[in-house]
Amino acid sequence: MTRIEPLRRAVPALVIPIVLAGGCGGTTGEQLGVTGLEVRGGVEVLREVATMARQEHPPVPTLRVSVHDVLDTLSSARSDAAGLPGARAGRLVSLVDEATRHGQRLSALLGDGDRHELRATTAALTRLSGRLDAMGMRP
Amino acid sequence: MKPLLAITLGVLSAVGGFVDIGDLVESGVVGAKYGLRMVWVVALGVIGICVYAEMAGRVVAISGRPVFDLVRERLGPRMALANLAGSFLVSLFTVAAEIGGVAMAVELASGVDRLIWVLPAGLLGWLVIWLVRFEHMQQAFGLAGLAVAVFAVAMWAAGPDWGALGAQAVRLWPPGDEAAPTYFFHAVALFASAMTPYVVFFFSSGGAEERWSRKDLRTERVNTLLGFPLGGLLSVGIAGAAAVVLAPLGVRVDTLSQIVLPVAVTLGLAGVVVALIGIFATTFGACLETALSSGYTLAQYFGWSWGKRVGPSRAPRFHLGVAGALLIAVLVVQTGADPVMLTELSLIFSAVALPLTYLPVLMVANDREYLGDKANGRLSNSLGLVYLIITGIAALAAIPLSIATGAGG
C-alpha cells in the first residue's frame, strides 16, 4: 500500500491543474481571436474553391463538400461570436454573415462555369479577408 | 523470383496499409497547425510499431499461434480479459471511425451526403470479408492505399521552402504562440495513430491465417521493417501538404475536405481522383482489418473456432463477432456522429489502451517455452521496455490532455 502512495498523490497533482486550466477557457478577447481565425480560415478555403472552380475541369463534388463544410464552420462561428460582448464581436458577426452569403453564392455557381461571377466572388472574398486582417484576425 | 515478389507485395501492402483514418486526420491536423514540427512523433511511433509488430510476427511464425491466443494461456483469463476489453473497445471505435472515413471519401467523390454511404460501406465490408481471399484483400487495399503518396507530390508541386520545412522537422517543441497542452495532445494522438493496437492483433492473426512458419521469419521482418517506415513517410507527406498549403492560409483542419484541399489546389482534378482512391483504399482496408481484429480478439479469448479461411458454418461465433462489429460501427456513424471527432476519440482511447496491448506481447515474446531460441534478445527487450514506458506516459496523459484542450480544439 505504501508503495503506491506517492503515485496516488502524483497523479491528481498532475491531472487536476491540467483539467482546471482547460475548464477555465480564455478571456473574451482570446475567444474572439480564436473565432476570428476560424472565420478567416473558412474565408480562405472559399477563396481557394472559387479559384479552383474556374479551372477547365474542376473537381465539382469535392469543392461542393468543401463549401458545405465551411458553411457549417461559419454557422458555428457565428453562434460563438454572437455570444460575445463588444463592438468587435458585432463586427465579426456581420463579416461572418457576409462570408456565408458568398459561400452560398459560390455553392450555387459550382459546376455552372460562369467564370465572370466566380472571379467577382474571389475578389469579394479577398476583400473580406483583408477586412478580417484589419481586425487582427490573421494567422 | 517468387520470394522477391512476395516480399515486394508484402512491403507495398504494409506501406499502404500503415495509413488509416487516424493517420489521415491527425497528420492533416498537425501539418496545418504545426507544419512539420511533429515528424519526430511519427518517427517515434513508426519505430515502436516496428518493434512490436516484429515481436508479434515472430511469435506467430515460431509458435504457429497468434499473440492473443497465447496471452490468455500465459497470463491467465483475468489479465487477458483486461487486454480483451481495452483492445476490443478500441477496435470497435476504430471500425466506426474507418467507416466514417469511407463514407466521407465517397461523399467527396460524389457530392452526396456521407450518411447515405454508411450502410453500403458496412455491407460492402462484410461482403469483402466473406468473399475475398485474405491475401488478395490485403494486397488490393494495401497497394491501392499507396495512392495517398499523391499528398507528397502535392507538397512538392506547391514549391515549398525546403529549408524552412527542414528546420521545422528537426524541432521538438511547439512554436512560441501555441499552447503546450494542445501540442502534446496532438503528439499523443499522432503517436497512437502509428501504434494503434489493432495493427498488432491483425498482423499476428493474419500471420496465423497465412500459416507463417520459421521459414517466413525473414519475409515477415522485411515487410515490417521496410513497410511501416515507408508508410510513415506517407503520413509525413500528408502533414507536409497541409503544412505548405493550409498553414500559410491559417486554415484549421477539422474535415476531410480540408485534408484533400492541398491536393486539389496543386494538382487539380487528377490529383483529387488519386487522393480519393487512396483515402477510400486506406480507410476501407483498415475497416476490414479492425472488424476482423474485433472477431479475432473475441474468438481467441473465448477459445472459439476462428479465421477468415474457416467458413461461417464452422466458425459461426467468430463471423458473428466480425459482422456485429461492423453493424455496431454502422449504427454509431449513422447517428450523424462527426467521423473526424470519432477518429480523435478513437486515437485517445487507443493511447489509453496501448500499455494493455503491448505489455502482454512483450511478455509472450520473452517466453522461451513458446519461442525457444527465437525469444526476445537484449535489443528487442530494451526497445520493448523503452516503448512500454513511452506508451505508459501517453496513456496517463491522454485523457487529462483531452479534457484540458477540449480534444485539441
Image: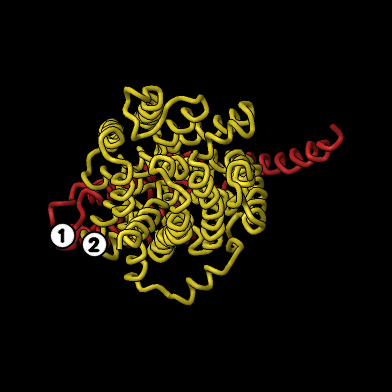
Chain colours: A red, B yellow
Q: Quadrant of the N terminus of chain B?
A: bottom left
Question: For this rendering, which residue is in front, B174 or B345?
Answer: B345
Disc 1 to disc 2, how far (Cα)?
8 Å
**In the rendered structure, are the residues bearing label 1 and label 2 in contact, judged by CB atoms less than 8 Å apart?**
yes
User: Residue B108, position in %: x, y?
Assistant: 26, 47
Residue at image location 52% in from the left, 42% down from the top: B63
Question: For this rendering, which residue is in front, A64 or B112?
Answer: B112
Kindly give the residue lying farthest to the bottom in the view shown.
B163
* Disc ID at residue A57: 1
Residue at image location 55% in from the left, 62% down from the top: B40
Res B315 quadrant in image: top left
Density class for disc 2 (Cα within 10 Å; few <14, some 14-19, many ≥20) is many
In the drawing, does residue B387 fall left or right of residue A71? right
User: Residue B112, position in %: x, y?
Assistant: 22, 39
Determine whether B178 is above or below B342 in the image: below
Identity of the amino acid at label 1? His
* Disc ID at residue B268: 2
Q: Chain of mark 1?
A: A
Q: Chain of mark 2?
A: B
Identity of the amino acid at label 2? Gly
Q: Secondary structure at mark 1?
A: loop
Q: Secondary structure at mark 2?
A: helix
Kindly give the residue lying farthest to the right in the view shown.
A2
User: Residue B331, position in %: x, y?
Assistant: 36, 26
In the drawing, does residue B86 fall left or right of residue A103? right
In the drawing, does residue B84 fall left or right of residue B239? right
Res B330 quadrant in image: top left
* Disc ID at residue B163: none
Res. A75 visible in picture: no
User: Residue B120, position in %: x, y?
Assistant: 25, 33
